[in-house]
Amino acid sequence: MPQIIIHTDGSSRGNPGPGGFGVVLQQVGTQRQKEIAQGYRYTTNNRMELLAVIVGLEALKIENCDVLVVSDSKYVVDAINQHWIVGWQKKGFKGVKNPDLWQRFLQVYRKHKVQFQWIKGHNNHPLNERCDFLAVNASKQENLLIDEGYEQQNLFDI
């Protein structure tokens, strides 16, 4: 099975505010690389960090890949590596922020063998910096998408 490294970052200009995510996928042992970015009109940084991971995993066309996700999000990395998500799932995600995205994450996460590695953000890691650039740039585009999972839960924050 292919070995994949997924670099991710999320951004929100204001928290909440316009946001975006950036993803760089690499197939180990090849020159194959793909970039994905998208912006949203009103969201949070944590949602964009998590959505970047989800979209990166969803981009894989075959199942059962060995995947390393490299992220500067303690929120995302610790939720997996510290097994917080297990408890959240047992409680039906009650009282947990972003339950829509965590449930979507679990669906795609289970299709692969995924490990998470945290790196310090804004620390001159070239692919983390590239993901940050993609995320911020995506948040500044015209015709941003609606983060329905966030906006439906927070109708009075807009």
Image (cartoon, rainbow, N blue to C red):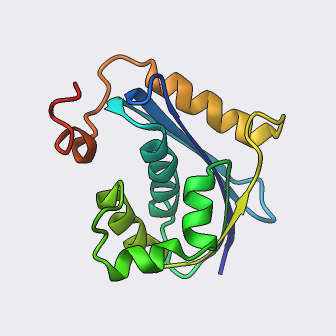
Tell me the residue at 29%/32% (across/down): 145
Res 2 → quadrant: bottom right
In this picture, residue 36 sits left or right of residue 82: left
Give percent across and percent down for residue 18: 39, 25
Is 66 drawn above or below residue 49 in the view shown? below
- 52 and 157: which is toward the camera: 157
Is 121 drawn above or below residue 33 in the view shown? above
Total labels drawn:
0
Tell me the residue at 48%/38% (across/down): 45
Give percent across and percent down for residue 131: 64, 38
Res 79 → quadrant: bottom right
- Quadrant of the drawing holding the N terminus: bottom right
Residue lying farthest to the front in this orientation: 95
Tell me the residue at 62%/61% (across/down): 77
Give percent across and percent down for residue 102: 38, 64
- Quadrant of the drawing holding the C terminus: top left
In this picture, residue 155 sits left or right of residue 36: left
Is 109 drawn above or below residue 155 in the view shown? below
Tell me the residue at 72%/62% (across/down): 117
- 138 and 105: which is toward the camera: 105
- 145 and 103: which is toward the camera: 103
Res 108 → quadrant: bottom left
